[in-house]
């Protein structure tokens, strides 16, 4: 999908979704406000009836007038007008600025601010003052009285659904983009990684075909060594990609048998001999594990050790200094690969075992890779029921430690 097309599609979708949400909100507000208006009209009608009744009462009734009667009269009329609520009722002397009566004195502040106020003259009271009957409904009552219809609930629900779907779509699109980016990075890196050994091998072959060089035993051995190392490099590379892809398959299984890990370490380190000498590096070994035999898949163990040592070299600036150690505690076998390279931050350490994760390098180093080596290593460790940990500090190097259950 072209970038401009994606931007246009997302923009149209965003505008449409936002407009829909706004329209729904406006509609919802209108519905609620209509229901508020209807409520006010009904209260007004009820109060009109109440005031009429108070006016029509015979003058003799004046003496028997009580505010409790007023309370029940209001409730009765509210019910007749479809409002089954018990508001707080107050009788307010507008000129004195005080309440003659309130059914709940604690709510006089609410009464003073209530919009439901109706001018009236108490019977038997001879005064030019202005009096009001004021009703105050609680917020909960008012909300319930709005009587939100199923239509309203549906609207609110649909607004929520649209908003959620919109964000899910945006996230899917952004994930898709990331995946595309990763794919093209992966292909670029793979091409680079495979091209380098191919050109080194072809150069070495050219040298070997030169008679003066091929007759010198030391030079010949050197170039044959280069071919063998680069070949091994490509083998592990292809192996890692293939095995990593295979491991995604649920039916993937390993082929465990008794293997001597110290011997595998020796074999792997031999294949790096030339790389170390080319970079003036050195490798130290402390293969103290005794026994060093565990039940494991030899191919995967070889690739695991190769990947860890290869990373140690790759992520060392200058001459690499790698220390490979093995040990046991009677129950577990420990293998650790320590380097003195560029190291990594705590936040990167949390992600390096994820597939395709590569620390963003900036100017610090420019090492090509796929970001699948450590993911593969972690999966191999997992399949062998072990653990892998990393200790690292930027510019001070890293130590990867694998612990595996010992045989038996
Ligand atoms: P890559 O092919 O990029 O090396 P890996 O899965 O082997 O992929 O490693 C993932 C990332 O972890 C690397 O890109 C690198 O940034 C970081 N990393 C791995 N090993 C080391 C190490 N020994 N020192 C510093 N950083 C490392």
Image: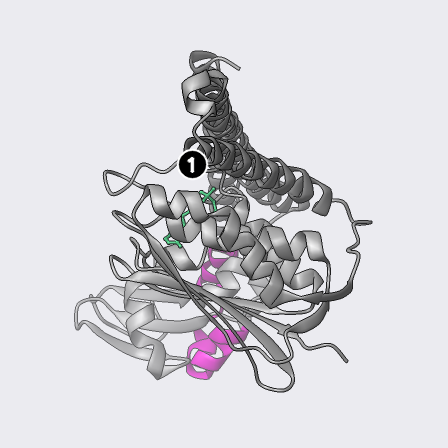
Dot 1 crowding, Cα within 10 Å, few <14, some 14–19, many 20+: few
Main SS class of the magenta portion in the image: helix
Quadrant of the image occupied by residue 386: bottom right
The image shows residue 405, relative to residue 373, as above or below, that is below
In-front residue for pair 76/328: 328
Residue 292 in sight from this viewpoint: yes
Answer whether residue 50 is magenta in the image.
yes
| Identity of the residue drawn at 36% across and 73% down | 90
Q: Which residue is mark 1?
A: 218
Residue 117: % across, % down: 35, 59
In-front residue for pair 213/328: 213
Q: Which residues are magenta?
A: 43-72
| Identity of the residue drawn at 53% across and 32% down | 179
Instruction: Specify the farthest residue to the bottom.
Output: 330
The image shows residue 231, relative to residue 248, as above or below, that is above
| Identity of the residue drawn at 30% across and 59% down | 340
Residue 154: % across, % down: 64, 42
Helix, strand or loop at mark 1: helix
Answer whether residue 145 is magenta in the image.
no
| Identity of the residue drawn at 46% across and 77% down | 60
In-front residue for pair 337/359: 337
**Left or right of 293 in this view: 10:** left
The image shows residue 183, relative to residue 268, as above or below, that is above
Residue 305: % across, % down: 55, 56
Quadrant of the image occupied by residue 244: top right
Q: Quick one: quadrant of the C terminus? A: bottom right
């Amino acid at each position: 999908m072209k970038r401009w097309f994606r931007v246009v599609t997302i923009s149209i979708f965003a505008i449409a979704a936002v407009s829909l949400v706004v329209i729904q909100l406006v509609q919802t507000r209108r519905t609620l406000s209509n229901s508020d208006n209807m409520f006010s009209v009904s209260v007004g009608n009820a109060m009109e009836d109440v005031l009429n009744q108070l006016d029509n009462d015979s003058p003799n009734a004046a003496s028997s007038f009580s505010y409790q009667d007023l309370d029940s009269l209001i409730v009765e009329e509210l019910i007749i007008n479809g409002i089954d609520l018990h508001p707080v009722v107050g009788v307010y002397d507008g000129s004195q600025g005080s309440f003659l009566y309130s059914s709940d004195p604690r709510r006089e502040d609410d009464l003073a601010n209530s919009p439901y106020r109706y001018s009236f003259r108490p019977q038997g009271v001879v005064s030019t003052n202005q009096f009001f009957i004021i009703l105050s409904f609680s917020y909960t009552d008012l909300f319930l009285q709005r009587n939100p219809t199923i239509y309203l609930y549906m609207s609110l629900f649909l607004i929520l659904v649209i908003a959620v779907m919109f964000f899910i779509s945006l996230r899917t699109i952004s994930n898709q983009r990331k995946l595309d980016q990763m794919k093209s990075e992966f292909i670029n890196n793979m091409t680079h990684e495979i091209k380098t050994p191919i050109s080194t091998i072809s150069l070495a072959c050219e040298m070997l075909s030169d008679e003066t060089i091929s007759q010198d035993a030391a030079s010949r051995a050197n170039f044959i060594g280069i071919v063998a190392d680069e070949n091994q490099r490509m083998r592990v590379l292809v192996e890692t990609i293939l095995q990593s892809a295979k491991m995604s398959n649920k039916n993937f299984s390993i082929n465990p048998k008794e293997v001597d890990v110290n011997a595998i370490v020796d074999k792997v380190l031999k294949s790096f001999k030339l790389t170390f000498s080319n970079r003036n590096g050195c490798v130290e070994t402390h293969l103290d594990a005794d026994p060093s035999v565990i039940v494991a898949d030899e191919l995967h163990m070889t690739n695991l050790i190769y990947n860890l040592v290869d990373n140690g070299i790759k992520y060392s600036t200058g001459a690499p200094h790698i220390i490979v150690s093995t040990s046991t505690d009677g129950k577990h076998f420990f293998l650790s690969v320590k380097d003195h390279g560029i190291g990594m931050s705590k936040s990167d350490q949390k992600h390096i075992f994820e597939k395709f994760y590569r620390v963003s390098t900036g100017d610090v180093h420019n090492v090509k890779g796929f970001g699948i080596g450590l993911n593969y290593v972690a999966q191999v460790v997992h399949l062998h029921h072990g653990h892998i940990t990393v200790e690292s500090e930027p510019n001070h190097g890293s130590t990867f430690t694998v612990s595996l259950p010992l045989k038996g």
